[in-house]
Image: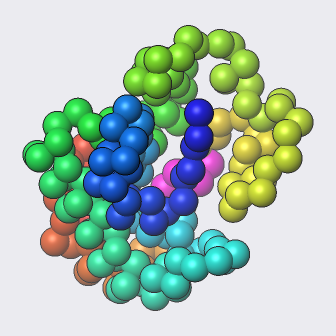
Amino acid sequence: FFIDKLPGNWVHVGLIHLILPNAKIIDARRHPMATGFSCFKQLFARGHHYSYDLTELGLYIRDYIRLMDHFDSVLPGIVHRMNYEALIDHPEAELRQWLAVCGLAFQQSCLRFHDNPRPISTASSEQVRRPIFRDHIDNWQKFLSNLAPLAVALDQVENRGHEEIP
């Protein structure tokens, strides 16, 4: 299995499906404002220049949601959508669902990912060393007044499964 969780992978879903028709594509979706805030505060090692401007970032997220909606309509079932907040609230149930999509069996070690000593070189390396936590899930709300350009850019997107953006 190959897992790539870079923020820009959504652009390649159509190509991935064409060249790897048996690939399992999972869209782990978070509230758009939480996604935007998370990307904006992260200094990515390479690329992702859109993430350094709130308006551009909001338009990027909006395009992502629209393209995923498009794939849902033209290739139903190709993209398996998972809700990040549901994963935080019900990790075992959500992990079982993700694994089932991939044809894998659940193992208790899946819930103890933070005990794995393997090297981690992603932006989330610090988080991966902790059990699943809820601390930062709504952190973006504390900065809402500073995130106005992001909220305005996202205002035109449907947020199925998420509360409306203020």
Q: From this viewpoint, is residue 30 visible?
A: yes
| Closer to the camera in the image, 147 or 100 | 100
* Residue at the spot 35% in from the left edge and 86% down from the top edge: 55
* Residue at the spot 53% in from the left edge and 36% down from the top edge: 88
| x and y, in percent, of residue 159 in the image | 22, 55
Q: Per the image, is 137 magenta?
A: yes
- Residue range highlighted in magenta: 135-139
Which quarter of the image is occupied by the C terminus? bottom left
* Residue at the spot 33% in from the left edge and 55% down from the top edge: 15
| x and y, in percent, of residue 53 in the image | 46, 88
Q: Per the image, is 163 magenta?
A: no
Decide if residue 52 is on the left or right side of residue 150.
Answer: right
User: Most extreme residue toward the left, as rendered?
Assistant: 73
Which quarter of the image is occupied by the N terminus? top right
Q: From this viewpoint, is residue 94 visible?
A: no
| Closer to the camera in the image, 11 or 63 | 11
| Residue 8 vertical position relative to residue 58 in the rendered view, above or below | above
| x and y, in percent, of residue 98 in the image | 46, 27
